[in-house]
Amino acid sequence: RFHHDLPEILACSSTELTTRDLSRRFRFIHIDGGHVYDIVKNDIEVAKRVLIKGGIVVFDDHCTHPGVSAAIWEEAANGDLIPFCLTPKKLYATWEPTKTSAVTDLTNWALDLGIFEMDTEAVRGLQFLKLRMKPLHLSLLYRIYRKLLKIGRLYHPHAEIIALLQRKGYA
């Protein structure tokens, strides 16, 4: 989708967001902030409040910080958060059960690329996809990344996942 205006990026603490009157809602939220449980819980509450129905939330550092992991999986167990894709650094989720069909599109995308190790797992009766780059491709990607960095162009699998979700109308 193309837009006439550039997106508005809100780069601030979620504790500041709770004091603002957010007059609009978002279809995509990327949470990469505090790694303390209480801050992540607040991030989740803010995201739930401002995410449109069917919107996607992405959590960074979900498996390297206990506070992040605890808050996310508590919301998945006690709330309605539905994780649908997991990478070593990112967890993609929604609060809308109908959006879990993204797993099929992401699986097909990953199979076409052939550079990921994949696995699926059921969470609360819904499938989610686990993606890891194959070691050979990870070292190749690192070499490509260094070359692209030198010429000022970057590539990141997360950006490709977001682009696919947007093309398919999920975010």
Image (spheres, rainbow, N blue to C red):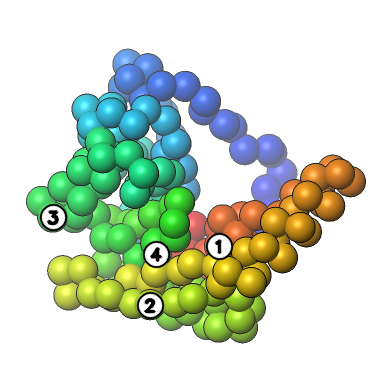
Q: Which residue is mark 1?
A: 161
- Residue 108 placed where, x, y %? 52, 82
Q: Residue at x 55, y 83 (%)?
A: 111
Counting residues from the start of the chain, the first of labels 3 and 4 encountered is: 3
- Residue 45 placed where, x, y %? 25, 36
In the picture shown, does residue 169 fall above or below 45? below
- Residue 133's mark? none
Counting residues from the start of the chain, the first of labels 4 and 1 encountered is: 4
Q: Residue at x 69, y 38 (%)?
A: 5
Tell me: 128 left or right of 160.
Answer: left
Q: Residue at x 49, y 67 (%)?
A: 132
Q: How far separated are the C-alphas under marks 2 and 4? A: 10 Å
Which amino acid does the dot numbered 4 rest on? Cys
| Cβ atoms at labels 3 and 4 below 8 Å apart | no
Tell me: 104 left or right of 96.
Answer: right
Q: Residue at x 44, y 60 (%)?
A: 87
Which amino acid does the dot numbered 2 rest on? Asp
- Residue 77's mark? 3
Which amino acid does the dot numbered 3 rest on? Ala
Q: Which residue is mark 4?
A: 85
Q: How far separated are the C-alphas under marks 3 and 4? A: 16 Å
Which amino acid does the dot numbered 1 rest on? Ile
- Residue 69 placed where, x, y %? 26, 45
| Cβ atoms at labels 1 and 3 below 8 Å apart | no
- Residue 119's mark? 2
Counting residues from the start of the chain, the first of labels 2 and 1 encountered is: 2
